[in-house]
Image (cartoon, rainbow, N blue to C red):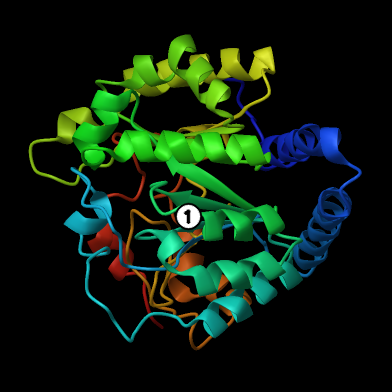
Amino acid sequence: MTPGFDLDQYLTQNVESIVKDALAASLKNPKETAFLLSFALAGKRAAAARTRHAEAGNHIPSFLIASITNRCNLHCAGCYARANSICDDAETTALLTDEDWGRIFAEASDIGVSFCLLAGGEPMMRRGVLECAAKRREILFPVFTNGTLLSENMLELIDQNRNLVPIVSIEGDERQTDARRGAGTYGKLTANMDRMREKGILFGASVTLTTENITTVTGDAFLSQLRALGAKVAFFVDYVPADAGTEALAPGDAEREYLARRLDELRAVQDGMIYVSFPGDEQFSDGCLAAGRGFFHINPTGGAEPCPFSPVSDTNLKHTSLLSALESPLFTRLRASELLRGHHSGACALFGKDEELAAMCGD
């Protein structure tokens, strides 16, 4: 991959192109035409807003990552969120409310955020939050889901609000997916992907990369299957060790070098899909993009964290604005440090450095 790769520019240009291609066959539908036109205009307005803030000395990232719930209906093997008590089955009153999320999404729109990735837990368990997101048509919301809760009612919501883009987790073939996510999961999610394809819904797939599956899930056969199912986006997410003894599964230098070459090949072909690697693409953007350099993470209770794999926070969005969170002591000191820059081993520059981050918190 060429140094200087601009992930923001790549995503913005290709999302617009894919949306245009996906809707071109049905532009007589006023709903879809309105979405296409508004999305193109919104991207320009968001870029202008970020420029205005930059001129005032405030860097606004194009992306947010929002974990909108701690609950999930599955118990996947090697789940980082469950292993670190971020995800569980208990109800909690500490979660941000639908209204809280609605305010955050409105603030994101005002300051120029273009993409807000919704995660969890399982985000489909918070329909109210998805409905709040749907109202912000100027923001694209990739919804990272295990794909099992895409009921007809949920698909209707997504069909009516094309800024909600399901990103379905798949681990490879049926054996690989069911081994990690539970028997029958593969059948449910592929059936739901077929239904989305039939409805013309824009969706993608998220694949956890390990040292064992990286060549398979980036290979032509698997990617051809995803395209046949109708996926337009492929997210490759490095495995972060959740269980002791699985450290060898985390991609290292050799795997990252392979993936960079493979992504160059895939992006050059222009086969109708967007390919994104996390955190692999970061190494070509002058280091880790966490802590507001390119994105930051909001946890289910409102904590503003550098990224999903560094659950340390000194600011809560229940009590402050996105702009204030971006200038928190933790984010400000972390961006000025060397932790986010340069080479690192393992899947994430900040993984396992909670004590160093905690020392940056507060006044």
Instruction: From this view, report whether residue 340 is shown above or below residue 71.
Output: above
Residue situated in front as seen by the camera: 193 or 14: 193
- Image point 44% across, 80% down: which residue? 96
Q: Quadrant of the C terminus?
A: bottom left
- Tell me which corner region of the image, top left, top right, bottom left or bottom right, holds residue 206: top left
At numbered mark 1, what does the secondary structure look like: helix, strand or loop? loop
Q: Give x and y (percent) for residue 352.
A: 23, 51
> In screen coordinates, is 104 left or right of 210?
right
Q: Give x and y (percent) for residue 78.
A: 19, 43
Q: Give x and y (percent) for residue 136.
A: 71, 67
Q: Disc 1 designates what residue?
A: 151
Instruction: From this view, report whether residue 270 is shown above or below residue 361.
Output: above
Instruction: From this view, report whether residue 260 is shown above or below residue 187.
Output: above
Q: Residues within 10 Å of mark 1 (few under 14, many from 20)?
A: few
Instruction: From this view, report whether residue 197 is shown above or below residue 101.
Output: above
- Image point 41% across, 39% down: which residue? 189
Q: Give x and y (percent) for residue 46.
A: 79, 59
Is residue 282 among what the camera can see?
no
Residue situated in front as seen by the camera: 264 or 329: 264
- Image point 37% across, 40% down: which residue? 188
> In screen coordinates, is 329 left or right of 135?
left
Is residue 94 among what the camera can see?
yes
Q: Quadrant of the N terminus?
A: top right
- Image point 75% across, 35% down: which residue? 22
Outermost residue, left direction? 245
